[in-house]
């Protein structure tokens, strides 16, 4: 299943961290995504509350940082899932 992450836009001057972002699952027509930090593996587990599909994103430049950048600049980005190397998560701003 596709996993397109929609992130609510933030301003450049705002102070926030990844855990503060509002995320939604596009394929579920805006299903709210709950994000939970997994300290043991240093990643975030993103789970859609509507369809229960999840994606694991690394704390890295091409993972969580890319999502934060999309919240600011609005540019669509591709992010690879941490565990399922075939799954590509697309991030776009709403």
Image: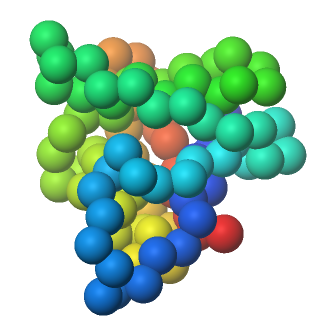
- Tell me the quadrant of the picture where the C terminus can be found: bottom right
Is 52 left or right of 22, judged from the image as shown? right
Query: How is colour applied across the structure in the image?
Result: rainbow
Name the spot of residue 24 as percent of width and height, x first.
66, 47
The residue lying at 41 percent from left, 52 percent from top is: 20
Residue 44 vs 70, above or below: the answer is above
Is 60 left or right of 4, judged from the image as shown? left
Q: Quadrant of residue 68?
A: bottom left
Most foreground residue, 72 or 78: 72
For residue 36, say whether it is visible: yes
Name the spot of residue 41 as percent of width and height, x first.
16, 16
Is 9 left or right of 50, judged from the image as shown? left
Residue 77 vs 60, above or below: the answer is below
- Tell me the quadrant of the picture where the N terminus can be found: top right
Most foreground residue, 26 or 77: 26
The residue lying at 33 percent from left, 86 percent from top is: 12
Is 65 left or right of 60, judged from the image as shown? right
Name the spot of residue 48 as percent of width and height, x first.
66, 28
Residue, far right: 29
Name the spot of residue 64 as percent of width and height, x first.
29, 48
The residue lying at 27 percent from left, 73 percent from top is: 15
For residue 85, say whether it is visible: no
């Amino acid at each position: 299943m596709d996993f397109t992450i929609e992130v609510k836009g933030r301003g450049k001057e705002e102070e926030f961290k990844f855990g503060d972002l509002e995320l939604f699952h596009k394929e579920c027509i805006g299903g709210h995504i709950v994000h939970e930090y997994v300290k043991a593996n240093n990643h975030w587990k993103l789970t859609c509350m509507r369809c229960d599909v999840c994606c694991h994103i690394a704390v890295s430049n091409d993972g969580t940082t890319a999502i934060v950048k999309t919240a600011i600049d609005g540019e669509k980005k591709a992010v690879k899932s941490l565990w399922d190397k075939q799954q590509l998560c697309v991030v776009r701003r709403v």
